Amino acid sequence: MDVITWCKQTEGLWLCSSSHFPAFNQAGRSQLAATLTPEACLDAFEATRDCQQEEPTHKMRFSAFISILRSVGPVVIGISLGFTLSLLSVSWTEEACSLDGKEGEDVTVGQDGQLKGARKPNSISTINDVESEEDFEPRIVPYKQVQQSAPKKVFRAKYISTELGMRERLLVGVLTSKNTINTLGVAVNRTIGHHLDTVIFFTGMRNRKVPHGMFVISHGDERQIWNMFQNIKYILDHYINEYDWFYLVQDDAYTEADRIKALVDHLSIDRELYMGSPEEFIGGEMEGKYCYGGFGYLLSRTLLLRLQPFLENCRNDILSSRPDEWLGRCIIDYTNTNCVSESQGLQYHHYELGKNSDPTKEQSEPFKKALTVHPVSDPEQMYKLHRYFTEIELQKTYDEIAKLQAEIKNVSVVAFDGNRSSQWPVGINPPFEPKSRFEVLKWEYFTEEEIYSCIDGAPKCELQGIDRLDVADVIDVAMIELNKKYKPVLHLKKQQLINGYRRFDPVRGMEYTLDLQLEVVNQKGHSRSVTKRVHLVRPLSRIEIIPMPYVTEATRIHIIIPLTLQDRSYVDHFLEVFASNAFETSENAILTFLFIYDPVEAQQVNQNDIFASVKTQINTYERKYPAVKIPWISVKTETPSQIKFMDIISKKHPVDSLFFLANVNTNVNSEFLNRCRMNSINNWQVFFPIHFQDFNPDVAYHNQQHPATVDLIKDAGHFDRLSFDEACFYNSDYMATRTRMVADVQDNEEILETLDIFDMFLKYSGLHVFRAVEPSLHQQYSFQACNPRLSEDIYHRCVQSNLEGLGSRSQLAMLLFEQEQGNST
């Protein structure tokens, strides 16, 4: 019979254990468990209910007990085991923490005799515990604040190239001496100094007079081996982390700088390379080859780093009479690197120059390929070599340009526009294309003697100075190119320039159109006169960054304000504006007034001081701003002159003072003062800003209310390019320029009255004169009193400035129109 023993629910399913269950008994009479749904389990139970046998009651109870025990038993066993383990751990802890010190021998005692650790909260107190608690005396433990260590300062390199480990490519060291540094040393510097980034001259004893513009390192000894050791040591100490290659050469060798740069640009920097002209050691006993110093040698950074730990050993152990041989033995002994003349398919070409030979007559192929030429006997021969190799490199450049132009022409044939897509000259930017009538570039007309576009507005003036040289050079180039094109069939000679035009194109350069009258001579000697039109372009060269000296915006400025009798009415407004822009912002500037008296006013200064009201205003502002002092200087003169005033002020200030010579009508602010600091460079540049001048308000705002503030618009004013009153310069530059004027002043003392400071710097200083519009330098309208005793140019500039400051052309035309209408009625 099949009897269901039990059924129960497990994880949402019913598990029925059966014995001889007919539905699942096909595999044999074995006990199995079938997972059924509740309905299937009940159906099976109903199907077999009639077949069940009655079992004894005690067996039924026993089976029920067993089923309950199976489910509850693991829980009971787990709880019992947990209690047992907890009791065992409590007994071990009590034994280890015994307070009488007898039962537990391993009790840990603190430095003050007290037991370490706290009593357990769940432990039972004993009599000894109570006594110990009664004897316990609390004590206050002072609080000690944990002092945090100062954060470690993170070092950041000044340049990102240093932080990223980027290095320059080549450093050149020239081995010279006290006797040759002013001759051959100077010649080497002039021929390679402007082609290479860093050139250092190593010498034993320093000459009293060091040539200007050369970086010279002196070791204080004339021993050649010692100097070579010091040279390598200096490079390792100062430049080993900044350069990848180091080139050492004597001053009696000419080096083609561009070729040595091209060589190191194609060499791998991770190789231990000792490259030059290999030579056998004297005597031939030592294996290997060293690089002969006369032709120079190239050392890699990797090689020098490997040599660095053994450099002292080389100095002490190696004996030699030649520095290049000593260095070669040191490198071979400790790095096992021989001198080579070829590496990675690149050759170190050199050429030995014969005695009394002329470089211009050398035509051999090894000479043309040479990186270095040795020996050079004198500076003149050095310059001849430099010219020869420069011409070779220049011709290579021309050939490359011609090749590229031919390729561009060939490619342009298949372009959409055909040959029109290649602009003339090939490779130069196409001409500027104007978008409106106002952008059309104008051409200047000229002949060989005159030009019809003058600076002063005259219709015609003489062609002179740099313009005359420019025209002559263009005509010569035109004739050379024409003869190059038509030779040998025709020979052309210039008869005259009929017409000449030129214009400056900002995208390509200066363009020329020449109509030349030429005499053409053929091979038979027959000649005739023809007219030929030629187009030429002088292209713009590539843009370069010019190094400028470092300047800072922290320099103090001394602002000089000259005052005459007519300027008194503007002082109140000037001080009000300056106080808000400088005094209240603690600007690093000192304001100085220069009171100018004529002889009559100076005699009455005690009875009637014309500047008494100004001095009262100065005292008022000094009381209002206690940290501010406004000095003033009084001078007496019949003819006010900027140079005479500055002579007095210059003597009262330090040499490194920065001056800003201004006008009382000028509104000075911090923005302009910072630009004054940046554009004035000591021993380099002076700054003459062009201020924005307001128009006469009666003209600009005729029959209108005058605005409180004036904006930079064309109807409100203009940049006064005829005014040179404002200037920023250093006292040292002024004093040096005045010194150069001494001879001319002795011959003509009136030059101090006829020149202004702008003309003085322009003619005598040799400094850069920086002239630019300054939108932050705003000046109110005022009529200037022009002094006829000044030079004619300065006087006319002053008169013209007054006229242009009245108003714009449209405003003046409107006033004239209204006046004409009023007269007609």
Image (cartoon, helix red, strand yellow):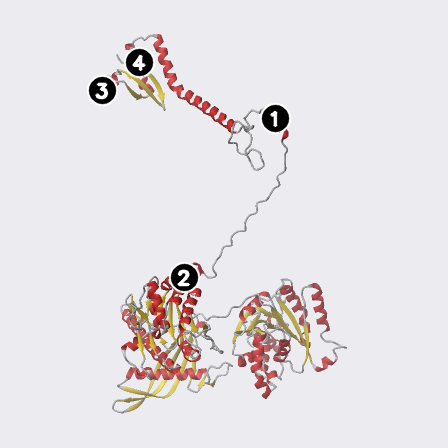
Q: Is residue 730 left or right of residue 377?
A: right
Among numbered discs 2 and 4, the one appearing first in the sequence? 4
Relative depth, front residue between 39 and 785:
39
Q: Is residue 133 left or right of residue 384?
A: right
Among numbered discs 4 and 1, the one appearing first in the sequence? 4
Quadrant location, the C terminus: bottom right
Q: Position of residue 475 (x, y in %)?
A: 38, 84
Q: Position of residue 687 (x, y in %)?
A: 55, 73
Residues under labels 1 and 3: Cα distance? 78 Å
Residues under labels 2 and 4: Cα distance? 92 Å
Among numbered discs 2 and 1, the one appearing first in the sequence? 1
Q: Position of residue 8 (x, y in %)?
A: 35, 19
Q: Looking at the picture, which amino acid does disc 3 mark?
A: Ala
Q: In this figure, which residue is indicated by the disc labeled 1?
A: 130
Tag nearer the camera, 2 or 3:
2
Q: In this figure, which residue is indicated by the disc labeled 2?
A: 166
Q: In this figure, which residue is indicated by the disc labeled 4?
A: 46
* Residue 581 picture quarter: bottom right
Residues under labels 4 and 3: Cα distance? 23 Å
Residues under labels 4 and 1: Cα distance? 75 Å
Relative depth, front residue between 465 and 592:
592
**Label 4: few (<14), some or many (≥20) within 10 Å?**
few
Q: Looking at the picture, which amino acid does disc 2 mark?
A: Met
CB contact under 8 Å: marks 2 and 4: no
Q: In this figure, which residue is indicated by the disc labeled 3?
A: 27
